[in-house]
Image: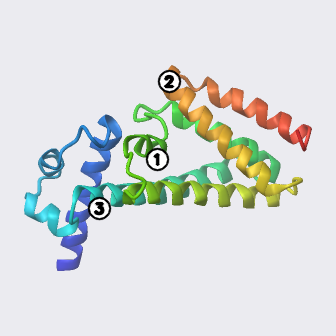
Amino acid sequence: MLATRTQQTRERILEAAESLFCARGIHSVGVDEVVSRSGVAKMTLYKHFESKDTLVAAVMARKAASFEAWFAAEVAARSADPVGRLLACFDVYAAWFETPEFRGCPFINATAELSDPAHPARNVAMSHKRAMLELLTEMCKAARVQSPRQLAEQWLLLLDGASAEAMLWQSPVPAARARQIARALLDHPGT
């Protein structure tokens, strides 16, 4: 029971911090706000996370795991065909761009905000991008494309670019444009 209560408290803190960080950014949210939103004492927060930096890293790790699982499931649900799944990546992003909580890629946003290259959350963001690249590489291999790793890198760049444009313009249209470019890459390999 104690472990469950401890886990529930930790989850409550992470949920509150994630909601605040995603809505307003990391630097503009203080620990006191996370404490208030989560309904725990400051001492309890520091029992789970030794600093705000470790809290931010834990939030990012949690977000990475949920995003990667969500993305893979959504892509798989949209197409059974390996090439169709590659193109479905952009449809999944378009749907994400239309959600009320979309504020751009939280990993790129966090990296832009955290200038210290040694910040633990930057490592989490980089690990997430590597995990996405591996997922896309496996999808490219399944689709039997030429140079799967290179195409996966191009896909990730298109997805990240579409995410930045969607945040700027508050529109899902960049996903459709990125999908068109992706289709051209599939139709004309090596370009």
Image-based side of 102 in relation to 43, left or right: right
Amino acid under disc 2: Leu
Q: Which one is earlier in the sequence, the residue at label 3 or at label 2?
A: 3
Residue that badge 1 annotates: 107
Q: Secondary structure at mark 3?
A: helix
Q: CA distance from mark 3 to mark 2?
A: 29 Å
User: Residue 84: x percent and y percent?
Assistant: 78, 46
Image location of residue 171, percent across then percent down: 54, 22
Residue at 40% across, 35% down: 101
Label 2 residue SS? helix
Find disc 3 in the rendering and name its residue: 54
- Are discs 1 and 3 less than 8 Å apart at CB? no
User: Residue at label 2?
Assistant: 168
The mark that comes first in sequence, 2 or 1, is 1
Comes first in the chain, label 1 or label 3: 3
**Residue occupying the point 85% across, 34% down:** 184
Asked if 124 appears above or below 109 in the picture, the reply is below
User: For the residue carrying disc 1, how many other residues have a C-alpha within 10 Å: few (<14), some (14-19), or many (20+)?
Assistant: many
Quarter of image, res 50: bottom left
Q: Residue furthest top?
A: 169
Marks 2/1: CA distance?
16 Å
Residue 122 versus residue 180 in the image, above or below = below
Q: Position of residue 120 (x, y in %)?
A: 38, 60
